[in-house]
Image (spheres, rainbow, N blue to C red):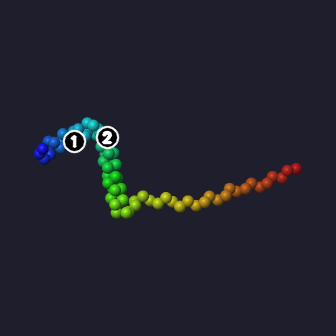
Amino acid sequence: MGEFSIFHWLVVLAVILIFFGGKRIPEIMKGFGEGIRSFKDGMSGVSQTPAPPAQTPAPPPAEKPAEEKK
């Protein structure tokens, strides 16, 4: 089996375009790039996800004044 020539790469590209369609390829490549970036970050120990905001406890609801019964 020899090396891939330009003709082989064109056939592979045509099959990919037929199989996935032109509109989904950018989505697939974006997901692929995010996966590689996540893998690199995981290997270096760096986290790109922002920390969730600190939650402050909600103040207690204001109590209604007691109604007087007659």
Q: Secondary structure at mark 1?
A: helix
Q: Position of residue 70 (x, y in %)?
A: 88, 50
Quadrant of res 28: top left
Q: Position of residue 4 (x, y in %)?
A: 14, 46
Query: Where is mark 1, residue-wise?
Result: 13
Q: Going by the picture, which residue comes out furthest to the bottom?
A: 45
Amino acid bearing label 2: Lys
The residue sitting at 38% across, 63% down in the picture is 46
Q: Secondary structure at mark 2?
A: loop
The residue sitting at 36% across, 56% down in the picture is 38
Q: Is residue 13 above or below residue 43?
A: above
Amino acid bearing label 1: Leu
Q: Nearer the viewer, mark 2 or mark 1?
A: 1
- Label for residue 26? none
Q: Going by the picture, which residue comes out furthest to the top?
A: 18
Q: Is residue 43 left or right of residue 13?
A: right
Q: Quadrant of the N terminus?
A: top left
Mark 2 or 1, nearer chain start: 1
- Label for residue 23? 2
Q: Is residue 25 left or right of residue 7?
A: right
Which one is nearer the viewer's eye here, 39 or 62? 39
Q: Is residue 59 left or right of residue 20?
A: right
